[in-house]
Image (tube, grey):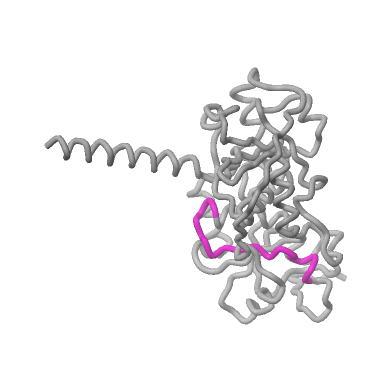
Amino acid sequence: MKATVIFLVFASLLSFTNQAMSLDSQPLVDVQWLKSKICVPGFIILDVRRSAEDYKSGHIPCALHTNYYKDGWRMRKQGVPHMMPPVPQLEALVGKLGIKVDSHVVIYGSGTGEFDAAETTSIYLTLKYLGHTQVSILNGGLPAWMDEWSADFDVGVVEPSPVQYTSNPKPDLLVSIDEVKTALSGGSTLVDIRRNDMFLGINKAWMLKRPGTIPGALNLPMSWFTVDSSLNFRDHQNLQILFTAANVPLEGRVILFCNAGLESSMGWFVAHEVLGNKQAVLYDGSLAEWTKSQDLPMTKHIELN
């Protein structure tokens, strides 16, 4: 009888621990959850706002600052912008921020625009690409924190304690141009995450050589994922409704792309992390790479004079 009681207590503790670990591993966390992790050893909070001055003026306590564009989270390769850097470069960047392999990293942005949200998901993707397991995004970003804990705010700069970071890369999260060429023959669903006017070929971004989209691609604009262009992601059920409305499958091989891999990181985050389709991948070079070659096909859904 005594042994049975001990076993049941142990099983309950194990179940509770697993539930706690599961909660801590969620891709999206709320302000209440983060409040309990502030300045706790093992947790690294990254403020990814573009302005270092805004960070110095006020940030979540113990948060470190990193700039997506200036600090090396992406690089230009063979004329293509915003490509994933080599692993050693990323290891140096992550280690410089004091992130250890067992750190739980929580990322937040200003939450004031779609591209701010995309920079947040792109850094999240980068850490996952390195094989980092414990990564979360603060849903709602800094505005959500300010709404509940505006008095709990620090000023100045938090200096990181650099460490040696050794990654466990997951290259299968990304696909190359050759794999996208193969996908033209079927077997994968191509999903364009850009605005509808760009998908239709009415307008194009500066880094593209030609307007339009990859033949056969579906359109699921990244603006659908969050509420009113904020960093507040829609709930699981509504995201499923939006994927279905765009005819994007919730399971199976899905290749997400955009202009240069930034916007599509939001699509990957929602499909792979939130909705759980582990076959969703991101085309890193996206249309900035694809349109460089005149031999590769493009579809314009609307032809203007």
User: Quick check: can you spot residue 235?
Assistant: yes
x and y, in percent, of residue 205 in the image: 83, 59
User: Quick check: can you spot residue 197?
Assistant: no
Which residue is found at the position 66% from the left and 75% from the top?
A: 179
- The image quadrant of residue 243 is bottom right
Q: Quadrant of the C terminus?
A: bottom right
The stretch drawn in magenta includes residue 303:
no
x and y, in percent, of residue 109 in the image: 69, 38
- The residue nearer to you, when weighing 66 against 299, is 66
Q: Is residue 76 above or below residue 123?
A: below
Which residue is found at the position 48% from the left and 49% from the top?
A: 237
- The residue nearer to you, when weighing 197 against 240, is 240
- The image quadrant of residue 100 is top right
- The residue nearer to you, when weighing 92 against 144, is 92
x and y, in percent, of residue 10 in the image: 28, 38
The stretch drawn in magenta includes residue 283:
yes
Q: Would residue 263 be found to the left or right of residue 185 on screen?
A: right
- The image quadrant of residue 268 is bottom right
Which residue is found at the position 73% from the left and 54% from the top?
A: 262
Q: Would residue 54 be found to the left or right of residue 168 on screen?
A: right
Q: What segment is highlighted magenta in the picture?
A: 273-290
